[in-house]
Amino acid sequence: MKKLVCSYDINQEDNQPETIQEAVAIVLLPKILKDKKDSLFLKIVDENEDIDKVISETTTPRIVGVGKSLDPIYIAIEGDIIGGPLKTHSLLEVPIILVAAYYAFNIQYPSSCNVYPFLEAILFDNNHIIKNKVVVHKVITCLKGK
């Protein structure tokens, strides 16, 4: 993670501050929420890695991004990608699409992953889902300034 954050060249034309902030937010979210297996939410593939292999090993929906810019970025599930590379206005739309994939395919979130209850509580104001998730509850309380 530190390597990814430090590898951004601010002077590079394609690295707009908003894009950098969005990529860092997506990468840090599982860390902030103390997920033990952040690869259940996001897998960053190095440009030299075999992305097809990573996608084929994916069982539950997750984000698969390539390189430090996470571009291209995919939603992978059960060894396949959904709809090809995502074209979004913002990287922050990608987690929303991921949550929607769980709903569309009627799949339960991995119980060891705090990112999904966090997203559902924030996006859909569903605080019921976080009642047993102490870390998620603390982060949301902190964000709301209470």
Image (spheres, grey):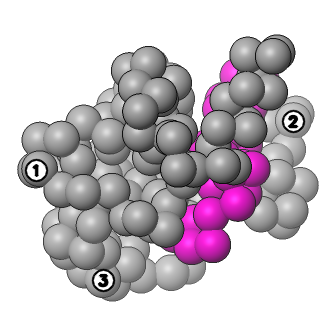
Separation (CA) of disc 3 from disc 2: 33 Å
Name the spot of residue 20 as percent of width and height, x first. Answer: 73, 35
Q: Disc 1 to disc 3, how far (Cα)? A: 18 Å
Q: Which residue is found at the position 82% from the left and 15% from the top?
A: 145
Q: Quadrant of the N terminus?
A: bottom right
On screen, residue 111 versus residue 142, left or right, reads left
Q: Secondary structure at mark 3?
A: loop
Assign a secondary structure to mark 2: loop
User: Looking at the rendering, which quadrant does residue 62 occupy?
Assistant: bottom left
Precedes in sequence: disc 3 or disc 2: 2
Q: Earlier in the sequence, mark 2 or mark 1?
A: 2
Instruction: List the residue tagged with mark 1.
Output: 105
Q: State the SS at label 1.
A: loop
> Dot 1 surroundings within 10 Å: few (below 14), some, or many (20 or more)?
few
Which residue is the site of mark 3? 57
Give the amino acid type for the residue marked by disc 3 in the picture: Glu
Q: Which mark is residue 10?
A: 2
Q: CA distance from mark 2 to mark 1?
A: 39 Å
Query: Residue 53's x, y, as percent?
Result: 33, 84
Residue 62's label in the rendered image is none
Q: Residue at x 73, y 16 (%)?
A: 144
